[in-house]
Image (cartoon, rainbow, N blue to C red):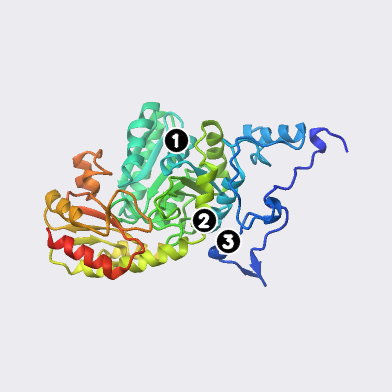
Amino acid sequence: MSDTPEAIVPPTPRRKPKPEVTTINGRPLKPATLMMGHGFDPVLSEGALKPPIFQTSTFAFENAAAGKRHFEGITGKRPGGAEGLVYSRFNGPNQEILEDRLSVWDGAEDALVFSSGMTAICVLMLAMCSAGDVIVHSGPLYAASEGFVAKVLARYGVTYVDFPAQASRAEMDAVLATAQAQAEAQGGKVALIYLESPANPTNALVDVEAMRDARDAAFTGDDHPPIAIDNTFLGPLWQKPLDHGADIVVYSLTKYVGGHSDLVAGSVSGAKKWIDPVRALRNTMGGICDPNTAWMLLRSLETVELRMTRAGENAAKVCEFLRGHPKVEGLGYLGFISDPAQQDIYDRHCSGAGSTFSVFIKGGEAEAFRFLDSLTIAKLAVSLGGTETLASLPAAMTHLSVPDERKAALGITDNLVRISVGIEDADDLIADFAQALDAV
């Protein structure tokens, strides 16, 4: 055989030498089953039952022509990306297996992993936007996401138009019209519709289907902005945004997917047409998660359904107790929605209420602080989705940088405590919350 590039047949990826079993008797296997081996063959790693950690910075090519072909994909001279392992800024065995398994949960064509959720969000937005473009986003967003749009991207000529998470279809139509006019005036385009649902920390839901319909009505043909959604609060178990009109799903994998408060990572997933430009920018900037973190996430994905199910059951019991307590002013829990429009979105989009919610302590910051400082089982910390129960005060912590008037408009009050229920015994958690409320 000639050793010219044209004659090279791309090698079969080393981690998947044979067709994988994804169905039995025509029945598709569930994600919980596929997490045990999807994307990995022990034959290629000395019979190791689980993927080893490939702690290496670079990978040897079969021959020079194969190396050239990989770099044609990496640099964009040929679509599709690298067809093999190249360099750990671009790809690696642990990361690729993880990306395959993340795709399974959301039913996505492709996925990318990053060193943090915010790295995923920032690279996504940078890949989609040019100077003069406009981002349309729901509110509230995680404070760092909102800050990146309003403060960092603004320095490069990217502006934004925002709308409340609970917006109706008519309000969505109006905000898209405003964004189109703004983009035209700036010589740009509406580059991205970015949603967070449920919103952090209020648990407000965005009607993804309504936004898809509004987007499709406002933009004709294939020239339309993608809809990206941060699915961290309910994903990957309780909400499947790609089924309801989103194009790209974003995660802080630090939270429920990682689930043990011992790693930091993020991801985006969706169709290749949207993921390819994000991959290209990640190849340039870096930001891919490291092999050890990817390996830990593979471990975590094996139990994510079990952990989230237990946490969700615990949250339902805890919220049932909190709902009737005299020192609780209200709850932002998806299991107890009072607004019919929000309930309609929940019924169409969600399969569970999750385990992260907000509780409004009667009083203000002083009373909320006393409640937080009196907790014994629940830990005072600002993350969520771990095996342990966490509590924090967003207005004074994660959303401290948000201007006071915007916090007030979004319902992020001084007495809003965000709670992420873990997998402890539910009765013990209720006892802990009871004694902490007694101290208020």
Residue at 48% x, 62% y is: 303
* Amino acid type indicated by mark 3: Met
- Of callouts 1 and 2, which one flags the residue occurring earlier in the amino acid sequence? 1
Q: Quadrant of the N terminus?
A: top right
Q: Earlier in the sequence, mark 3 or mark 2?
A: 3
Q: Position of residue 151 (x, y in %)?
A: 33, 32
Q: Residue 299 — which label?
A: 2
User: Is residue 396 in view?
Assistant: yes
The kind of residue on which mark 1 rests is Lys
Which residue sits furthest right?
A: 1
Position of residue 238 measured from the top left corner of the image (x, y, whole percent): 42, 62
Q: Which disc number belongs to residue 189?
A: 1
Q: Which mark is residue 36?
A: 3
Q: Nearer the viewer, mark 1 or mark 2?
A: 2
Dot 2: within a 10 Å radius of its alpha carbon, few (fewer than 14), some, or many (20 or more) residues? some
Q: Secondary structure at mark 3?
A: loop
CA gap between label 1 and label 2 equals 41 Å
Residue type at mark 2 is Arg
From the image, state whether disc 3 or disc 1 is nearer to you.
3
Q: Which residue is found at the position 43% from the left and 37% from the top?
A: 122
Q: Secondary structure at mark 2?
A: helix
Residue 351 makes an appearance in the image: no
Q: Residue at x 62, y 35 (%)?
A: 87
In the structure shown, which secondary structural element does the residue marked by tag 1 occupy? loop
Counting residues from the start of the chain, the first of labels 3 and 1 encountered is 3
Determine whether, in the image, residue 404 is placed left or right of residue 3.
Answer: left
